[in-house]
């Protein structure tokens, strides 16, 4: 669904005035979010989220109808008689198309509100699909057998089902139940289109009540029940009446008090387990949650599964409030801790990077469902690495108990012994909180403990504690047998998948959001234009990019999983527009020529490639006779390869290294002595003028003009005035103020 609309598209819709000009005045009066329109004619377009609710409801309904029409139109019609089989499509092209659909679907899905019914239902179906995949990986079943096993376990209550997944199950004979055909359809849709393929139109049931058949009304009542489970039927009816004008403006028919009361009673009866978990999570664990089995039963190798979590309480350090992010390998119990300002997705990614560089890449990661771990940033990072992420249920800390116990061990074992421990401020304190220990408070959400250390000091102390104490102490947990984490990891003699550090750094850069179109003048982003020589090949196409917040003058451009180039903003980096434009035109011309070459070239290339493939295959067979297994193996994915290429793109060109024969030939050449005192034919060349030298020249001339030395020199004054107003001067001035030492300037000498 689109997120931006022009005034001409909105005119006459519910909640809108009749003409585009009147809509523009309405937008200005009501303060809608706007953006310059890129289409022909210009003007402004307005964000869907800022439009009146009646207009939003109409646009969403229209989009849903269009989506259903597209699905119906896409249903294939069998041909009679059957045509000969078509040649198989290119698997690489199919994979790129699938990744493109998933990326577009993720962008649409991200536009939905966190509590939107469509979003919650799709996340619930995703849990079922991922749970089926987890059974395939961990229990070695076929996909069909795994589907049947999951259906049986869910319907018989043998596996804890998150509330969001339980709500997504079809309602059959008064209870939620999962079927194998439904699970198969969800799996195929997820593999084809990602999570957007699981998103539908609220899932209304035929013959439902007035509340269930009106999505806006259903979302309002269920949202209130989730926010305040103690709400009675009268409370819910009062809320509906208070929002009555808005609902009726959106075409919603209001229910009677008795209908609201009956809906609440029936919903609680049909969703007893969910209701118990909402009202009393502790009671839900006692009544419904299964307690047999162990997370470590299926852990058989190093880096098979990691768990990640953050300390619930905050640390008040000398340089501000911080948190500690932890990562643990379930097989060896090796631990990695990272101190961060807050538990953000970036901090989680950096903790993962530190562990991956030291331990190797994991096969899977288990986290809770917090915003920092379920963010598109961290989720997309793991997806590019082809590492599956398993999410724990809300309030189910036992599903990631290994990392939670490790954090508690850290809290009890080191934190209260830290030098400079201040403890809790009990000046106004309640007695119960004062009796809590330091470790209890740091493991309690919302608590703050004060330590008289900087974040760097705390990080060094934690690193030392992990390396010298935690990794060297014997562990008696499941699968450890009294071994230390250090010894357990050292005992592993299998492969360790290693990744390129610079490729990981490139993937951890912030994604630039939705795809951007490469126009005639480059890529436009954040009111800046970025250009690059190789962008000429992609004129008129959509690309993705990533950026480093510390260097916004450059963006790293990708086509799906393939790295294209580093595009630069001339105003920020000082590159020559003319040189880049000439290179881009040459690259575009070369690309067009390559596309129109004679087909014979492809025939020759096919023959050569086939012979080369045979030689490589025979050589690899011969190597099997002498090749020994390696301790580590490179680990890569298409996105890792592209990220590594992006990292190498900024490296300087390698220096020339002459061979001994070239050095000998050069030494044998006759030496020509320069004439003493200079020759009449010697022409002195002026140094190459750069933007930096012109800027320094202007600074010197500016001082002279202020002293009045060029009052009679109009040419110098004309250049002084023109250069001081050009874009190059502004860019150089900004860089000289940021890095005065590079220009030989002091703070006093800056412009």
Image: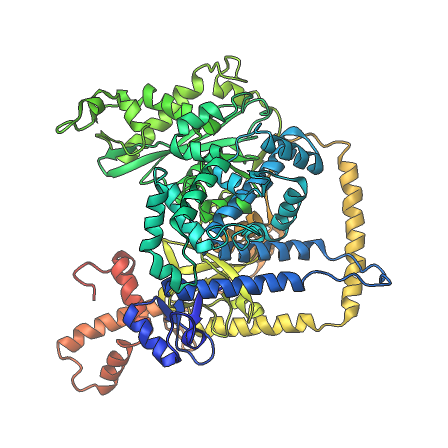
User: Does residue 77 sit above or below 179 in this rendering?
Assistant: below
Q: In front here: 682 or 662?
A: 662
The residue depicted at 48 percent of the width and 58 percent of the height is 545
Q: Position of residue 286 (x, y in %)?
A: 45, 23
User: Does residue 529 sit above or below 372 in this rendering?
Assistant: below
Number of callouts: 0
Q: Position of residue 21 (x, y in %)?
A: 36, 80
| Residue 587 visible here | yes
User: Does residue 271 sit above or below 658 in this rendering?
Assistant: above
Q: In front here: 194 or 696?
A: 194
Q: Position of residue 681 (x, y in %)?
A: 43, 77
Q: Which quarter of the rendering shows the C terminus? A: bottom left
Q: Quadrant of residue 335?
A: top left
Q: In front here: 236 or 292?
A: 236
Q: Position of residue 276 (x, y in %)?
A: 43, 31
User: Does residue 531 sit above or below 130 in this rendering?
Assistant: below
Left or right: where 709 falls relative to 153: left
The residue depicted at 58 percent of the width and 57 percent of the height is 100
Left or right: where 320 falls relative to 344: left
| Residue 688 visible here | no
> Which colour assignment does the render follow?
rainbow
The residue depicted at 71 percent of the width and 38 percent of the height is 144
Q: In front here: 134 or 19?
A: 19
């Amino acid at each position: 669904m689109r997120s931006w609309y022009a005034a001409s598209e909105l005119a006459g819709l519910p909640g809108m005035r009749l003409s585009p000009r009147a809509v523009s005045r309405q937008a200005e009066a009501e303060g809608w979010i706007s953006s310059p329109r890129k289409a022909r004619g210009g003007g402004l377009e307005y964000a869907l989220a800022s439009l009146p609710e009646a207009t939003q409801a109409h646009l969403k309904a229209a989009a849903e109808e269009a989506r259903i029409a597209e699905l119906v139109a896409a249903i294939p019609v069998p041909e009679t008689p059957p045509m000969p089989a078509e040649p198989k499509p290119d698997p690489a092209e199919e994979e790129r198309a699938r990744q493109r659909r998933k990326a577009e679907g993720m962008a649409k899905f991200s536009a939905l509100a966190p509590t939107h019914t469509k979003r919650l239902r799709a996340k619930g179906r995703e849990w079922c699909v991922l749970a089926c995949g987890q059974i395939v990986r961990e229990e070695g079943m076929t996909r069909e057998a795994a589907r049947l096993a999951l259906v049986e376990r869910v319907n018989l209550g043998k596996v804890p089902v998150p509330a969001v997944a339980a709500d997504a199950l079809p309602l059959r004979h008064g209870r939620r139940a999962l079927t194998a055909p439904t699970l198969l359809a969800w799996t195929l849709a997820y593999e084809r289109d990602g999570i957007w393929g699981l998103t539908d139109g609220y899932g209304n049931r035929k013959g439902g009540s007035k509340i269930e058949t009106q999505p806006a009304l259903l979302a309002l009542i269920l949202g209130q029940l989730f926010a305040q489970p103690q709400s009675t039927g009268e409370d819910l009816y009062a809320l509906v009446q208070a929002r009555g004008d808005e609902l009726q403006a959106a075409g919603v028919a209001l229910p009677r008090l008795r209908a609201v009361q009956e809906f609440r009673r029936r919903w609680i009866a049909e969703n007893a387990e969910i209701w118990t978990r909402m009202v009393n999570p502790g009671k839900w664990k006692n009544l419904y949650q299964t307690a047999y089995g162990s997370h470590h039963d299926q852990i058989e190798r190093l880096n098979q599964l990691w768990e990640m979590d953050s300390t619930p309480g905050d640390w008040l350090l000398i340089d501000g409030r911080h948190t500690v992010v932890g990562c643990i390998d379930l097989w060896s119990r090796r631990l990695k801790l990272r101190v961060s300002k807050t538990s953000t997705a970036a901090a989680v990614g950096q903790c993962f990077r530190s562990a991956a560089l030291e331990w190797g890449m994991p096969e899977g990661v288990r986290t809770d469902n917090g915003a920092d771990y379920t963010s598109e940033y961290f989720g997309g990072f793991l997806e590019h690495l082809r590492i599956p992420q398993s999410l724990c249920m809300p309030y189910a800390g036992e599903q990631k108990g290994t990392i939670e116990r490790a954090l508690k061990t850290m809290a009890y074992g080191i934190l209260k012994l830290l030098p400079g421990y201040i403890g809790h401020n009990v000046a106004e304190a309640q007695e119960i909180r004062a009796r809590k220990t330091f470790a209890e408070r740091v493991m309690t959400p919302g608590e703050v403990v004060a330590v008289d250390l900087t974040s760097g000091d705390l990080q060094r102390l934690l690193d030392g504690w992990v390396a010298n104490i935690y990794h060297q102490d014997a562990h008696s947990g499941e699968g450890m047998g009294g071994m230390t984490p250090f010894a357990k990891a050292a005992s592993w003699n299998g492969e360790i998948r290693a990744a390129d550090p610079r490729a990981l750094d490139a993937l951890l850069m912030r994604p630039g959001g939705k795809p951007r179109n490469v126009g005639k003048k480059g890529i436009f982003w954040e009111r800046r234009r970025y250009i690059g020589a190789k962008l000429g090949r992609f004129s008129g196409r959509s690309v993705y990019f990533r950026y480093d917040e510390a260097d916004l003058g450059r963006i790293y451009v990708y086509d799906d999983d393939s790295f294209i180039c580093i595009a630069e903003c001339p105003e920020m980096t000082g590159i020559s527009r003319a040189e880049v434009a000439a290179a881009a035109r040459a690259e575009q011309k070369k690309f067009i020529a390559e596309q129109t070459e004679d087909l014979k070239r492809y025939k020759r290339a096919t023959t050569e490639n086939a012979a080369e493939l045979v030689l490589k295959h025979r050589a690899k067979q011969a190597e099997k006779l002498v090749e020994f297994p390696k301790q580590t193996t490179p680990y890569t994915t298409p996105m890792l390869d592209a990220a590594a290429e992006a990292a190498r793109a900024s490296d300087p060109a390698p220096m020339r290294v002459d061979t001994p024969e070239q050095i000998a030939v050069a030494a044998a050449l006759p030496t020509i002595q320069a004439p003493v005192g200079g020759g009449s034919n010697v022409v002195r060349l002026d140094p190459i003028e750069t933007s930096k030298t012109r800027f320094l020249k202007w600074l010197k001339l500016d001082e002279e003009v202020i002293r009045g030395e060029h009052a009679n020199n109009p040419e110098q004054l004309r250049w002084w005035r023109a250069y001081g107003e050009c874009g190059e001067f502004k860019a150089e001035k900004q860089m000289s103020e940021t890095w005065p030492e590079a220009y030989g300037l002091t703070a006093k000498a800056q412009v």
